Image: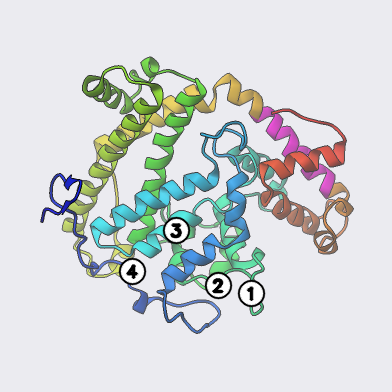
Amino acid sequence: MIRSSPAGRLLGPVFEPPPPAAFAAHPAESRGRLFPEEESATRTCYSRDRDRIIHSTAFRRLKHKTQVFIQGEGDYFRTRMTHSLEVAQISRTLARVLGLNEDLTETVALAHDLGHTPFGHTGEEVLEACTKDIGGFDHNAHALRLVAKLEHRYADFDGLNLTWETLEGLVKHNGPVVRPAPAPIERFDARWPLELSTWPNLEAQIAALSDDIAYLNHDIDDALRAGLFGIEELQEAPLAGNTVRRVLEARGRIDLSRFIGEFVRTLIGAMTSDLLTETKANLDAAKPASAAAVRANRGPVAAFSPGMAKKAAALKQFLFFRMYRHPRVVVSREKQKQIVHSLFGAYAGDPGLLPRDWAAACGASRDAVTCGIVRDYIAGMTDSFALKEYVRIFHSEITL
């Protein structure tokens, strides 16, 4: 069907979404919540989960947590929050095309980075090293801990009391969890089993691959704007190079902002088209009649084609050396490590440096209980708050 408007006709047919698929997650079939609640009269259980994520303290803090560049370095650069919103947009579109539950897909996408520390993976590496004797640190496990315990928004329970399907997607969106899992996951699974050995719902699989699409494209966007490499270098990159050439051939030499816009939408289009084609082929082969059949499948149902997966992996390697290990980024990373390591040592050695309620929960200096409390406290920090705390405790400025 072609629709028209006063300004002119839309070009091409208008997309009409398919009806919900049998293998989608259906709200009426949800396994419910750990703590029974009266469900909303105006929202599905999954849209309610999404709203709880958006209103959470942990989600708000993502606005001031590093993606690659420190929040505040520039107005254009991604933070964990803007990245999560971009993942949600891509995943919701894919879910609509496949007849999946859009609310659940979006919820998992919005929640997938909740457990990240200040300074991104750098902070995670330091917390893992500082706490390896008490179980270490894993951002997916910490995300579960946040939504199941550390968020204090409700009078009747700790956490957000999300549905089983959302929790499954949060924990397993990257695939089955190898046992023994990180301690927070093992403890929760003992209380309410998440079927860790199976693949997650298809909504979560789509959210995970949307994460790859989003960060590959938008890290390139940020790197070009930051001048870490130029269009000429990108032209030699796996997967991205062909896209650069297509844009240049179609548009010629245009200003950088317009080039980035054309590049990103072209490459996102290519990756999403490949993902949809391969996933539909897998669905045709597996013929899952329910969400349970998706979980029972021997492998993932959502996937890139082997060719696209190989090219995407090669592009990740290009970005690893040209962006994530660029001298400008590495210098900043070393300072970030210093901040997180110093803060951990200070709080663990003197819990009185923590806020009163956190200090009251601690045990003796540097014991397992205290180190666990300190781990949770630092993991929840934003980049800017970690910097302020460093100045407060050590009376020393540090420039990233």
Q: Which quarter of the figure has residue 329?
A: top right
Secondary element under disc 3, as helix, strand or loop, is: helix
Instruction: Determine which residue is flagged by label 1.
Output: 154
Q: Residue at x 57, y 55 (%)?
A: 59
Seen as rendered, the residue at the extreme top is 232
Q: Give the distance between the C-alpha atoms of the residues marked 4 and 2, in whole angstroms.
A: 18 Å
> Which badge, 1 or 3, comes first in the chain's sequence?
3
Front in this rendered view, residue 38 or 313: 38
Contact, CB < 8 Å: mark 2 with mark 3? no
Amino acid at dot 1: Tyr
Residue 351, image x, y percentages:
86, 53
**What numbered label is drawn on residue 368?**
none
251 in the magenta segment: no
- Does residue 238 appear left or right of residue 11 in this picture? right
Contact, CB < 8 Å: mark 1 with mark 3? no
User: Magenta region, mostly helix, strand or loop?
Assistant: helix
Residue 259, image x, y percentages:
35, 25
Secondary element under disc 1, as helix, strand or loop, is: loop
- Does residue 223 appear left or right of residue 57 in this picture? left
Task: Classify mark 4: residues with Cα within 10 Å, few (<14), some (14-19) or many (20+).
Answer: many
Q: Residue at x 52, y 83 (%)?
A: 36
Q: Which residues are magenta?
A: 333-347
Instruction: Determine which residue is flagged by label 3.
Output: 108
Q: Give the distance between the C-alpha atoms of the residues marked 2 and 3, in whole angstroms.
A: 14 Å
> Which badge, 2 or 1, comes first in the chain's sequence?
1
Instruction: Determine which residue is flagged by label 2.
Output: 161
